[in-house]
């Protein structure tokens, strides 16, 4: 049996002004990607680089990302693993790319994942209620 875990956090925060950089930051904050510990915004920068490269159909290795952003390979791998755990990034032949071609599709995919998880929770809750005689 293979167990695939996916962890994403949804945070409701006030939407910023209509500036693409602010909106990208808001987008990432809203899905729990960026936090105060990321002082140099490396996660944000990696996410943006993967967004650009996916759009250009140029999938990147961790070394290429590290070189482009002047980050250590360890930092890149740490953040890419978090992005993969959130179900946002996939690894194909040691190259990374976003799960889908654009952010709108990404939101649709996340919505589907959340709905599927909620359906599973409901089924388990119904089963527990039956076992407890509720």
Image: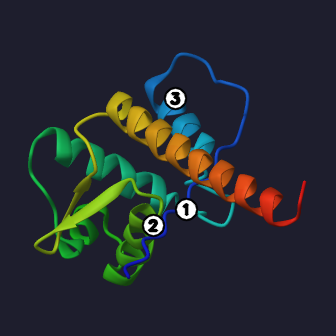
Question: Disc 1 to disc 2, how far (Cα)?
Answer: 6 Å
Task: Please report contact status of discs 1 and 2: CB closer than 8 Å, yes or no.
Answer: yes
Q: Position of residue 110 (x, y in %)?
A: 46, 42
Which residue is at 44% across, 34% downward?
107
Report which residue position mark 1 lands on: 7
Question: How many numbered marks are there?
Answer: 3
Report which residue position mark 2 lands on: 85
Q: Position of residue 6 (x, y in %)?
A: 49, 63
In the visual, does 114 lie left or right of 104? Answer: right
Q: Considering depth in this image, is 70 or 37 the residue closer to the camera?
A: 37
Q: Position of residue 104 (x, y in %)?
A: 37, 28
In the visual, does 10 lie left or right of 13? Answer: left
Mark 2, Cα crowd under 10 Å, few <14 / some 14-19 / many 20+, is some
Which residue is at 35% across, 79% downward?
72
Task: Please report contact status of discs 2 and 3: CB closer than 8 Å, yes or no.
Answer: no
Mark 1, Cα crowd under 10 Å, few <14 / some 14-19 / many 20+, is few
Q: Quadrant of residue 12?
A: top right
Q: Position of residue 87 (x, y in %)?
A: 41, 57
Quadrant that contains the C terminus: bottom right
The secondary element bearing badge 3 is classed as helix
Report which residue position mark 3 lands on: 23
16 w.r.t. 112: above or below: above
């Amino acid at each position: 049996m293979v167990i695939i875990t996916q962890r994403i956090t949804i945070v409701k925060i006030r939407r910023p002004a209509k500036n693409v950089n602010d909106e990208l930051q808001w987008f990432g904050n809203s899905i729990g990607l960026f936090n105060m510990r990321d002082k140099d915004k490396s996660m944000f920068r990696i996410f943006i680089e993967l967004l650009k490269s996916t759009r250009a159909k140029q999938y990147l290795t961790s070394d290429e990302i590290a070189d482009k952003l002047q980050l250590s390979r360890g930092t890149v791998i740490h953040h890419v693993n978090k992005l993969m755990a959130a179900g946002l990034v996939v690894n194909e032949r040691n190259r990374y790319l976003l799960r889908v071609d654009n952010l709108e599709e990404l939101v649709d995919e996340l919505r589907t994942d959340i709905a599927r998880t909620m359906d599973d929770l409901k089924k388990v809750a119904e089963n527990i209620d039956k076992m407890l005689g509720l």
